[in-house]
Image (spheres, rainbow, N blue to C red):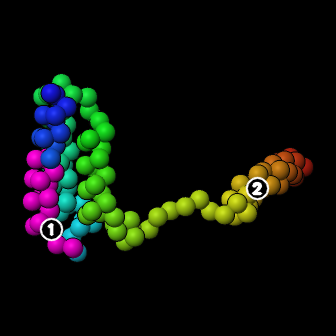
Amino acid sequence: LTERNYTYITQKCWDYFVDLMRNVTTAELCEWKVISRPYSELQRCLESWADHLNYSYPNALAEQYIFQSHHRYFHNCTLEHPVYFDPPEDVLLAMIIAPICLIPFLVTLVIWRSKDGKAQA
């Protein structure tokens, strides 16, 4: 009974979210300040009703609605913002090895300069 009630209510949460999203233009779909209210309302609705019905949260049904929201409304958002990846292995290796190779040189330079300073005194 609890699962059936939660299933019914989550559909109402989704319908309310879809209704709120009707006011969002396509150009605004990736702007957090615009979509944060409808998105937060969906999450709040799913979570609060689960809590009210003593139903676990997060749960598969709630996650399905969250994934559905991303698939339907926000699937193109990552394309507008740069996605950062690790550098290629050869670049990463050079970035690691270069400072390591400098350490012996700098230690030698410091020792040589300190010996040179003592000789002048």
Residue 119: percent from the left, percent from the top? 90, 49
Q: Nearer the viewer, residue 38 or 16?
A: 16
Segment tinted magenta in the rendering: 12-26
Q: What secondary structure characterizes most of the magenta part?
A: helix
With 117 as the anchor, is 12 left or right in this view?
left
Q: Is residue 65 magenta?
A: no
Q: Residue at x 29, y 47 (%)?
A: 64
Q: Which residue is mark 2?
A: 97
Q: The N terminus lies in which quarter of the figure?
A: top left
From the top left corner, tell me how far across and down residue 88 is, in percent.
66, 63
Q: Where's residue 121, x and y in %? A: 85, 48
- Residue type beneath disc 1: Val
Q: Residue at x 31, y 60 (%)?
A: 71
Residue 114 - label: none
Mark 1 — residue? 24
**Element type at marker 2?**
helix
